[in-house]
Amino acid sequence: MRVAVGGYLTCTNSFATQTVGLERFQAATLSGERLLRTGRGWSAIGGLVDVARTEGWELVPLQFILPGIGGKISPEAHDYAKDSFRSLLRQAGSVDGVFLQLHGAAAAEHVDDCEGDFLAAVREVLGDTTPLIASLDGHANVTPLMVEQASLLIGVKTNPHYDFVAVGRAAGRAMAGMFAGSLAPTSAWAQPALAPALQKLYIAPGWPMDQLMREAHNLVAGDARVVDVSLLGGFFCSDIPETGISVTVTTDREPGLARELAEQISAACWARRHAFQVDVVSVEDGVREAIETAQGPVVLGDLADSGGAGTPGDGTVLLAELLKQNAQGAVVGNITDPAAVQAAVRAGIGRQVTLTVGGKVDRFHGEPIQISGTVRVIHDGRYTAATRFNAGNYRRGATVVVDCGGVEVILTSRPTHGFEVNHFRSLGIEPTARQILTCKSELQHRAAFEGIASKIIDVDTPGLANQIPGRLPHRKIRRPVFPLDDI
């Protein structure tokens, strides 16, 4: 069997001011053997490769685009992704199936549902009967078009996400079943009027998504007719009609059962809607509590400028409050400011600098702030994550640490998801030896610092990933929807 492999892995914050353009897409395009090697051990493609080798399939690597998280995609970039993949698929000749690693929350300036549009383009080349299977991120905003065009959609079951390999293997096993004729997938999609903020999508004991995941699993456990249940939280910072929680149930030749289960799980989500209310404190109160806590480290979550939500990463509000309250033993997890980084690099290690940092991309995340301190670290920005989720190698670009007395400020050249211990340790900062750590993250910091932090406090910072209902200017999302509407 010949199986074509590729992907389109990007997530869109509809409110971010920086467009993701063609140049960024082209720079993030993988093909050939490099495509198959990338992500071995952590990606859905890696899991599919494992099954393909066992089954003896011939893999045909086409194109995998990984431009990361950002603002809306330009028309040129999306059309490049779609048209070049379609062209490569035609050039590949006859294939027996296609596997795609998708995110599920990509939106362009001219297309709200990029993945649905992408799948439709692939399906046009394949025809109606060739298996087309795709994996999805836990923040996918699943649309009816996506379900209609794919033979099977399989979403991750964790958040933070660490089961991509397992999802890829499940996709491979399903494809093998379709090849053998022992599986004929039928899928149904349902969506409650619920679009929760990202903070509450954490899947851990005591959190609503964990309880719902368990209910969904128990509902289908032992029923051989059920192939997959994907309960996905959606991406609150994306503004399309389908933004929010969705349920896709796939059965073997049982469309009625798929519809019944999808609606049942959707109803269970709706019944728990009030459990998704956001818990944040004011910046002033959060910093004060962190300072007054007897034992550190206290982790402050900067949810509204999260590195995982497509914001610029140059928010300054927490830094300003730490300086105002004369915090000691504090580390500002990161502020993206390439100009400030280069000024510190030019000064050199051990030199005193006065820099204006942050607040330069927009004014949604705070004003630029002047800091004075000593350049303690100059680093190339590369490090390997210590967590099983968001695993892999990170590239922050040139990175510096400026010690401003009681507050150390990490400045990066690129927006980064600085939420875990190796982000700090790679720069010579031991998290357990500090009183306060700030992380630009919506929920990953909770999992990363579990067992390390004495306390985790999420603060109500301003920004384009703000978690409070009504703060983001949603226009296209279906209405009414909870919690934007009191229903």
Image (spheres, rainbow, N blue to C red):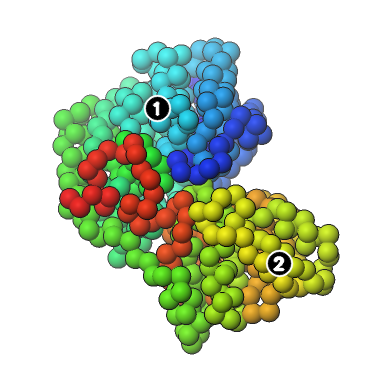
Q: Residue at x 46, y 70 (%)?
A: 283
**In x, y percent, where is residue 118?**
45, 25
Mark 1 and mark 2 lie on one chain; the one further toward the N terminus is 1
Question: Measured along the vertical axis of the image, is residue 226 above or below residue 254?
Answer: below
Q: Which residue is mark 2?
A: 401
The quarter of the displayed image where residue 132 is located: top left
Q: How many marks?
A: 2
Question: Measured along the vertical axis of the image, is residue 362 above or below residue 227?
Answer: below
Q: Which residue is mark 1?
A: 116
Dot 2: element: strand
Q: Is residue 300 left or right of residue 129?
A: right
Q: Is residue 111 left or right of residue 311?
A: left
- Is residue 309 at all visible to an observer of this figure? yes
Q: Residue at x 56, y 24 (%)?
A: 76
Three-letter code, disc 1: Gly
Three-letter code, disc 2: Val
Q: Residue furthest bottom?
A: 294
**Front tag of 1 and 2:** 2
Q: Residue at x 42, y 14 (%)?
A: 124
* Depth check, front residue: 55 or 420: 420
- Is residue 170 at all visible to an observer of this figure? no
Q: Residue at x 66, y 61 (%)?
A: 357
Question: Measured along the vertical axis of the image, is residue 392 above or below residue 97?
Answer: below
Separation (CA) of disc 1 from disc 2? 43 Å
Which numbered dot is residue 252? none
**In x, y percent, where is residue 341?**
73, 58
Dot 1: element: helix
Density class for disc 1 (Cα within 10 Å; few <14, some 14-19, many ≥20) is many
Question: Measured along the vertical axis of the image, is residue 315 above or below residue 154?
Answer: below
